[in-house]
Amino acid sequence: MSDTPSDASPRPRRPFIRGLPLVAPLRLGRPSDTWFKPALSVVAASAVPHLTLLALGRLDLVMYTMAGSFCALYGHGLPYARRARTVAGVVLSMAAGLAAAMVTASLTHSTAVLVAVGALLAAAQKVACDAVRIGPPGPVILTFVSSAALFAPQRLDQVPAHLALTLAAGSVAWLVCVGPALIRREGPERRAVARALEAAADRVAEPGPRTRHTAAAAVHAAWQCLLASGRPTPVRRSLERLVVHAEAAGACAHPDPDRLRAWAALTRARGPVPEPPPAPGTAAEPYGIDAERAALRASGGRRAARRTLLRSLGPGSHLLPVAARTLIGCALAGYLCAALGVGRPYWAIVTAASLYQANTTLTWNRTLQRTLGNLLGVLVFVAVLPLSRTGPLALVLCCLFFSFAAEALITRNYWLGSVAVTPMALLVLEFGGAHPAGELVGDRVLDTVLGALAGFLAAALVTNRRAAGRVERALEAAAQARTEAERALGHPHAERAQARRALTARLVELREAADIAAGEWWQRALPEQRLLAAERAGHRTLAATAQRQGPPVRAPETRRGAVAPAPANGAA
């Protein structure tokens, strides 16, 4: 075969700016199936320290306890064994950022220095959260706390006591997040498996690339949740079998989506987990997950995980351009507000930091959502301010209400949650004493607009050429995983299952990398035909391993620019 690309191969294009949507980012979606968990958790974690300080007459210290209470927002999608470690890590990270901010604030009153430190902390928090894939609410809570502390009056001798308050409130948040394990210890695993079954049913009912990818991602998330759970139990064994059924659904000759949805409903409910028969062509024994879990927990597995984490933070990391955007955008927003005489430039820093998503298009979406939500939230603050000033208890209850409302609404759309976040952030200032309403409203509006403009400007000007390179690496990893899965067809069942899970993970990562690169500005053309061929070949291999058939007809190896022929029937 000639090395010259065929006529059908994609031709290079100059870097370009993609169109930006105006209406789609503001549409409301369905709420998360677990929206009430972070909403109730943050209220419970905040009520204990809030009411304690109210009884002691020290509501001026709420900012420091609230920093620890906000940690209750994290980890609700994780099994309890991992959630305990994750939330503990968030509490320590929150305390570390707060300590750095308080020490800086006690040593200098220079706005230039404070803004610089705030931007550095925001960039570091963004990289760290993205590297460990902490999930929502991501780094924005950490940045909000550390940036606010930078501009709060502070003495060096007060730092230990204030930090102790944060750790104490963080301990309450940890107990709130982990406590439900005493009631329903497999709850997170059951929800993850239920999502996988529902996604598999959707794939069967409406075959297509979108449902195929959604099902693969849900199955991968379910396996990851089971791998991170504690010791095997009868319930987890049944959940493993259900995930195998979800995997095999796309390859069965006569799949039944209604049965998958019925299993999903029973799995999500509080009753017994369904006891499914072995999936078509599979054995009844565990599917290699015990060996995989043991390998991950062994010293070699932990070292490999650390190496992967360090690579994601290294000089060639795809996270660094986003970190550079965060650093430049937050610094620009802070200095711009300070130059205009705004008294609270940290609001602009937080606004800019909250915008940065995986690519420029998503950052634009968040810019629209944040701006609209904050401006509407200011109006809500004006309406509720007279009520909050009727007494300290009313102020505490208003803050708790908006904490709940923010988490209840934000999963429908970020701008809707911001309508509740904004008055809560403004009411926090009332704990230290009343402020003129006009001043608070004016500063917040100006900070929002300037922070959004500066933040998006940095995202537009700081290029991320590494997004396309990540796609190339994902293509190579997917091809290697597909080869290993095909080789494993003649091996014992446990090895085949592990190879299948590895291929699923690589295909999910490939689609994620492609979606991120597709929404990036100033990007070279993506190898769309290679992506299509790799995904089709990978999912054919997954189907073959699920059916316990021989190796599928392999797509010809594709060099850069070459096109693999699609299946004759067009099926994936």
Image (tube, rainbow, N blue to C red):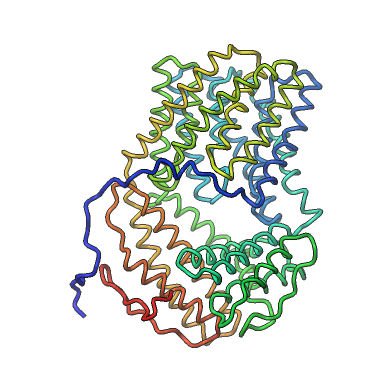
Residue at figure coordinates x 58%, y 81% from the top left? 254
Residue at figure coordinates x 75%, y 74% from the top left? 275
Residue at figure coordinates x 22%, y 51% from the top left? 14
Q: Is residue 461 above or below residue 62?
A: below
Q: Is residue 129 above or below residue 311?
A: above
Report whether 65 appears left or right of 372: right
Give percent across and percent down for residue 525.
Answer: 28, 57
Residue at figure coordinates x 69%, y 22% from the top left? 61
* Residue 286, picture quadrant: bottom right
Q: Is residue 69 above or below residue 294?
A: above
Report whether 363 appears left or right of 423: left
Residue 213 or residue 230, whichever sits in front: 213
Give percent across and percent down for residue 471.
Answer: 37, 60
Task: Locate the N terminus by quadrant.
Answer: bottom left
Number of numbered discs: 0
Report whether 218 appears left or right of 531: right
Give percent across and percent down for residue 319.
Answer: 42, 48
